[in-house]
Image (cartoon, rainbow, N blue to C red):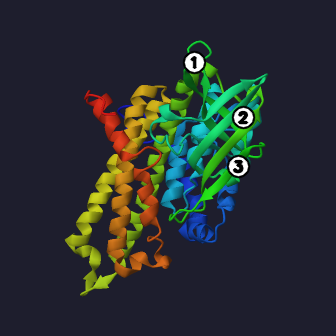
Amino acid sequence: MNAMNFVEPEERVALRKAAADLAGKYGHGYYAKKARAGEKTDELWNEAGRLGYLGVNLPEEYGGGGAGIADLAAVLEEFAAAGSPLLLMVVSPAIVGTVLSRFGTPDQKKQWLPGMSDGSKKIVFAITEPDAGSNSHKITTTARRDGGDWVLSGRKVFISGVDEADAVLVVGRTEDAKTGRLKPALFVVPTDAPGFEFTKIDMDIVAPENQFSLFLDDVRLPAEALVGEEDAAIAQLFAGLNPERIMGASFSLGTARYALDKAVGYANERQVWGAPIGSHQGLAHPLAQVKIELELAKLMTQKAASLYDAGDDFASGESANMAKYAAAEVAIRAVDQAVQTHGGNGLATEYGLGSLVTAVRLGRIAPVSREMVLNFVGQHSLGLPKSY
């Protein structure tokens, strides 16, 4: 999608339809049943991987589609719109796949990217710490050299999908020998490494993916576990964070579409006082507002993805933050209004909306809080003084 063309290319339109058809075979019933049983959506993940949907953004030489984040985001949006979103698409191919594709060594790419492309391997991402959420400068997970090895120690929290991952991309810090200051570094840590432990965090969100606390107790890694250059980790880190925001926005957009579709269907069918309830402006107008806000958020998400895929990291950062903000807000409004439109049925399990009330709320918090987005826009877009 170039700057002045608001129509997606034919290939992406076809990709969307194919992804929607696949996810439609599973639907929200499948997703909710798996989540409530504490099971994973492995059947959808594995089929999506086999058909090439999970690695559309990864390099062709490693089994990927050779396309961009815009295409991967389109797949996730369609899965979410069908009621079966795959959260680990945000993490494994988008964040970690992007970082390894751009900065990984040839051996790291060979080891991980083919499996990430076909879905047979998953790497999750660990940056957040108990005392370092949005402020990544406060990260205390440290990596020290010991002979030819690295030794990692620290804690991470709210890390998605560790129980189904082969490895974790851990953001740690090394000490600069010249200045003594700590600086970021990225490491691929296998989940079966000695000293690596994880504990599930009980959540009130009904989802197949779990959240974990990580404990790294002198985890010994070979030299080749370091991703890219020890001195360039800030650039590597931000290379993964913009795709994370774009994918987070797409997750919210798809969920908003799912809820709006359910609400409109019900408003057209449900008869009260001899007419469909959708004929009342008290219900029609809020749904129309959701549609408008959804289309606006979708345009900003596509702009962010387009800029990112064109290699403009800075401009895509502004758009990705705005897209993530707008998509989270409309997802919350869409689900809330869908529940209201359904009345009591909106909270009945059969209608597949009640569990989304808490799920969409997550979009305001992660992967970056609404307040930190506003800080970013105030400082970088408006030129206001830094507030933190």
As drawn, the residue found furthest toward the left would be 281
Locate the C terminus by quadrant. top left
Between marks 3 and 2, how big is the CA–CA gap?
30 Å
Percent x, y of residue 320: 41, 38
Q: Earlier in the sequence, mark 3 or mark 2?
A: 2
Q: Which residue in the protein does label 2 denote?
A: 62
Dot 1, crowdedness within 10 Å: few (<14), some or many (≥20)?
few
Q: Which secondary structure, mark 2?
A: helix
User: Above or below — where is 68 with respect to 279?
Assistant: above
Tag 3 residue: 197
The answer to whether residue 326 is left or right of residue 224 is left
Task: Measuring from the top left, give residue 271's x and y in whole percent.
Answer: 31, 84
The residue type indicated by label 1 comes to Gly
In the figure, residue 41 lies in which quadrant?
bottom right
Q: Amino acid at mark 2?
A: Tyr
Asked whether, in this view, residue 127 is left or right of residue 369, the answer is: right
Circle 3 residues within 10 Å: few <14, some 14–19, many ≥20: some
Horizontally, residue 212 falls left or right of residue 138, namely right
Left or right of residue 382, residue 155 in this image: right
Residue tagged 1? 180
The mark that comes first in sequence, 1 or 2, is: 2
Circle 3: element type: strand
- Amino acid marked by disc 3: Glu
Marks 1 & 2, CB-CB < 8 Å contact: no
> Dot 1 lies on which element?
loop
Q: CA distance from mark 1 to mark 2?
A: 39 Å
